[in-house]
Amino acid sequence: MTSTVPAPVTRTAEGSALQAVLLDMDGTLVDTEGFWWDVEVEIFRRLGHTLDAAWRHIVVGGPMTRSAGFLIEATGADITFAELSVLLNDGFEARIGRTLPLMPGAARLLAELSGHGVPTALVSASHRRIIDRVISSLGARHFTLTVAGDEVPRTKPHPDPYLAAAAGLGVDPARCAVIEDTATGVASAEAAGCHVVAVPSLAPIDPAARRTVVASLEQVDLAFLRGLIAAP
């Protein structure tokens, strides 16, 4: 877990119950969920296996332990998790080195949050090496804290990443708004007690208690997020 800039909670708007905004990375801020699948397809092709397109929805948004483990078991490929993990991170890092498209509305939202001094954390199942590459494009100045999937005991869908982010910011998870794009990330945030804004990427997500579903980050701004968190 890495803190990038100090930003006390008291800098949020007077009278607002919102204490912090916690954001997922792949598929939420950067349009990279498809990159992981493309890299997986290429690696397994070199190993002599063809991935079933139906598996994409099984592995999307999950931790590497789950996605890589599933693909090894499903294909019977002669490769260990440790070996595959290195290949996946290397391949993904090469892809984002060529292009890193932001999701519509991401740059505007990050600028608004940092401009108003809202404590903001990037919370991803991706490993630290990947986050550090992506953060340079997103702008480290926008984030008070970053939490990587290989820095917590259990990553998404467990609550650990979002609990760690809230603790690192010194805020109540119930007064945090989380923005996620997959059911795995939504489950993690909700298990931590946060209110979730779901912006589905590859698979639909239904609205629920303490969960708001929108079509795009272009529908999300600071006023919208403040309106989600009821006063204690």
Image (tube, rainbow, N blue to C red):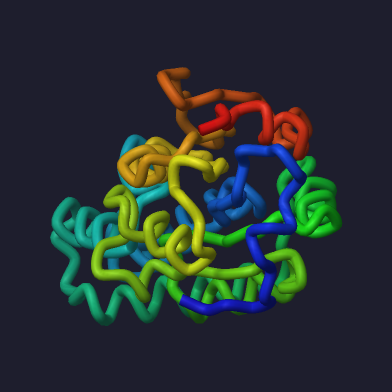
Q: Is residue 38 left or right of residue 43?
A: right
Residue 175 in the image: above or below residue 170: above
Residue situated in front as seen by the camera: 112 or 6: 6
Please tell me how many numbered marks the rendered image carries.
0
The answer to whether residue 69 is left or right of residue 147 is left
**Residue 154 percent location from the top left of the image:** 25, 63
Q: Position of residue 177 (x, y in %)?
A: 56, 41
In the image, residue 165 above or below residue 93: above
Q: In the image, is residue 126 above or below residue 15?
A: below
Give 11 or 119, whichever is nearer the viewer. 11
Asked whether residue 88 appears in the rendered view, the answer is yes
Residue 209 is situated, as x and y percent measured from the top left of the image, at 41, 20
Which one is nearer the viewer's eye here, 6 or 159?
6
Question: Residue placed at 54% from the left, 52% from the top?
Answer: 24
Query: Which image quarter: residue 46?
Result: bottom left
Percent position of residue 9, x then y: 64, 59
Q: Can residue 52 be spotted in the picture?
A: no
Asked which quadrant contains residue 221, the reply is: top right
Residue visible at 55% across and 57% down in the picture: 35
Q: Quadrant of residue 143?
A: bottom right
Relative to residue 49, is residue 115 drawn left or right? right
Give the residue displayed 18% in from the left and 76% down from the top.
80
Residue at the image point whose x is 40% and y is 44% from the top? 189
